[in-house]
Structure formats: C-alpha cells, structure tokens
Image (cartoon, coloured by chain):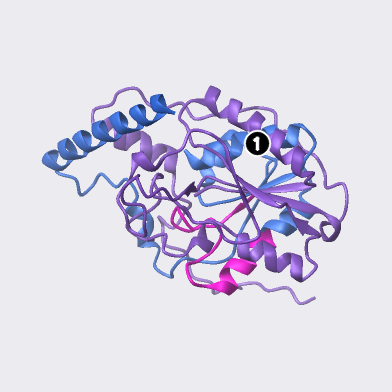
Chain colours: A blue, B purple
Amino acid sequence: MCHQTVSLVARHIEADGIPTVIMGCAKDIVEHCGVPRFLFSDFPLGNSAGRPFDKVSQAETLELALRVLESAPGPRTTAQSPQRWSEDASWKRDYNDLSTLTPGKIAERRKEFDVIKDVARARREGT
Amino acid sequence: MTATAPGANAAFAQEDDVPIPYMQRTRDYYLALGYDNPYRWASFTEVPFAPLGKPLGRSRVGLITTAAPYRPDAGEQGPGAPYNAAAKFYQVYSVATDEVPDLRISHVGYDRKHTSAADINTYLPLTCLREAVTAGRIGSLASRLHGAPTNRSHRATFVDAAELLRRCREDEVDAVVLVPS
C-alpha cells in the first residue's frame, strides 16, 4: 500500500500547486495511479532511497530524484535509476512467489493473514 | 559530452529481468490463498503537474515517508522482523528533521527475503537531504517530516492527503519528496 499511498498524496499536493517527486520501487503501482514525477529504482521493496550501507548509491538516488523534480517535462514523468541490485536478476522471482508453495503452506499463509487482518482492524478501531 | 552506449555486442538481459509486476503478483497470491475479492488499485486519467517555482538551490524541500515511529509496546519492529500489523499507524504524524528519527518499516510488506531494513537510509533519505542542503543543492529542508498512514481505503488516504497538504503549507515548502517504504 505504501506506493499507492504516496501516489495519492503526491497527486493531492501537486494539485494544490506544490511540485512533488516520488522515489520508489514499485513501478506498476505508481504508474497505474498516475503521478507527476517518479524516480524508479529497480530494487527490492524497502530500498526506495538506495542500496543498504551504500552512501554513493543513496546520494546518487536522491540526486536523480532532484533532477527529475527540476526537469520533468510534464506529468507521468518516470526516470529509472541505472543502478542494479545485483547482476543476477533471479531475486525478482521471489516476491509473493506461488510456485514453491504447497497446499499446506498456502493454508498456513491464509491463517497468518487472517490474524494480521484482525490485529490491524483492532488497531484501526482503537485509534 | 561523450555519449555512453552499450554497442552492438551488448548481451540481452535475462528474460524475467523486468520491473516486478506487484499488482499481478499480489492479485494472484491472495486469490491462491482463497480471497476472491481482488483489490482495485487507484488509477486516474488526469495527472496534475506544477512546475518548480524557483531553482532548487533556493527551495525549501519537504519529506513524506510511510515509515512508522518505533513504539516499544508494538512488538518486534527491527531489521528482519516479520510483518507486524500492531506497528501500523492510522494518523498523520510529524517529527523534527534536525536529527534522524527512529522510524521503522515492520508494518509494511517490503521484500523480506532480499532486504532487511537494517539501514534507515534505504527508506528515509533524510541524511542525504541534509547533505544536499550543506552542498547547496537544495535551499533548505523543512523543519519537520511527515508520516503518511498506509491504508487499503482510498477514501481514508484522501483524508490523510488533505492533512499532509495542510502541514506542508504550514512548513512553507516549495517542493516535496515522497518515499514509500
């Protein structure tokens, strides 16, 4: 939900006249929504601002976002960071990967998610 | 300036080396788990656009994050912690930017297999933004950053967006950087 959340917020802020740029890792969600400016890093979710413990990666990621902020020609501008997470892209297969889940594992995941929903609901209603 | 180009001998990328289709993966995953009400992601035909009103070097920049303040009573929230719904927040919050706050991402579905959230700078570029101010790249940083609650409800997010805009106006920012966790 994070990428959709900031996409909706960016749209609202921009519509009021303040320019925005999103730094993120979920290209489809952000572009599907439609945002003014987006710096896409093809990294695992959680690394929107650069690689862990890599100051050069982080500084370059922010610099690219600032350049997009300055130079986007119009809405729906996406620039992709040239940085790669690793040479081997097989990590991309793993997120919500169903291919390795047995029926038993799927049932277990269902139960876990039902608990998560209950906790979130209780938290939301208590807020 | 010399252009860089891979040339005619560049190797093809791996066939599945494309941006991960999160909407499709999420849809398929939850259908497999037995939830037969696929989520409808927000999508619009019109997109607003406001050009920068002044050079970045004279602009005040705001920062919005989806990371959550650490709460000692909310269970495991550290690097590598499993998904923790108890750590979610449902109200916009604001914290000062003069030092790096203790914000965590255990409440979001980041890629736990390939990253651990051990380095806050991967999801909160506050230190980099402060260095950008020191370097003159941006004029100044807003005195506070803001946290955006993540919510499946579009309606709830619109309410939060209005509050975030109000706080950005109070901060008198000229531009905003938004960083989802």
Q: Is residue B140 left or right of residue B102?
A: right
Residue B154: image location, x then y, percent? 53, 26
Residue B57: image location, x then y, percent? 83, 61
Q: Residue furthest bottom?
A: B2
Residue B12: image location, x then y, percent? 47, 65
Q: Chain of mark 1?
A: B
Q: Is residue A105 left or right of residue B126?
A: left
Q: Which is more toward the observer, A95 or B180?
A: B180
Magenta-colored stretch includes residue A15: no
Q: Residue furthest front?
A: B73
Q: Which is more toward the observer, B69 or B51?
A: B69
Disc 1, SS: helix
Residue A127: image location, x then y, percent? 44, 28
Q: Residue at x 54, y 22 (%)?
A: B155
Residue B4: quadrant of the picture: bottom right
Instruction: Say which amino acid is labelled 1.
Output: Leu
The stretch in magenta equals A38-64
Q: Residue furthest right?
A: B54
Q: Residue at x 65, y 72 (%)?
A: B5
* Residue, disc 1: B164
Q: Is residue B55 left or right of residue B155?
A: right
Residue B1: quadrant of the picture: bottom right
Magenta-colored stretch includes residue A56: yes
Task: Specify few, some or many for label 1: CA neighbours under 10 Å numbering under 14, 14-19, or 20 or more.
Answer: many
Figure label count: 1
**Is residue B8 in view from this perspective?**
no
Q: Residue at x 72, y 66 (%)?
A: B132
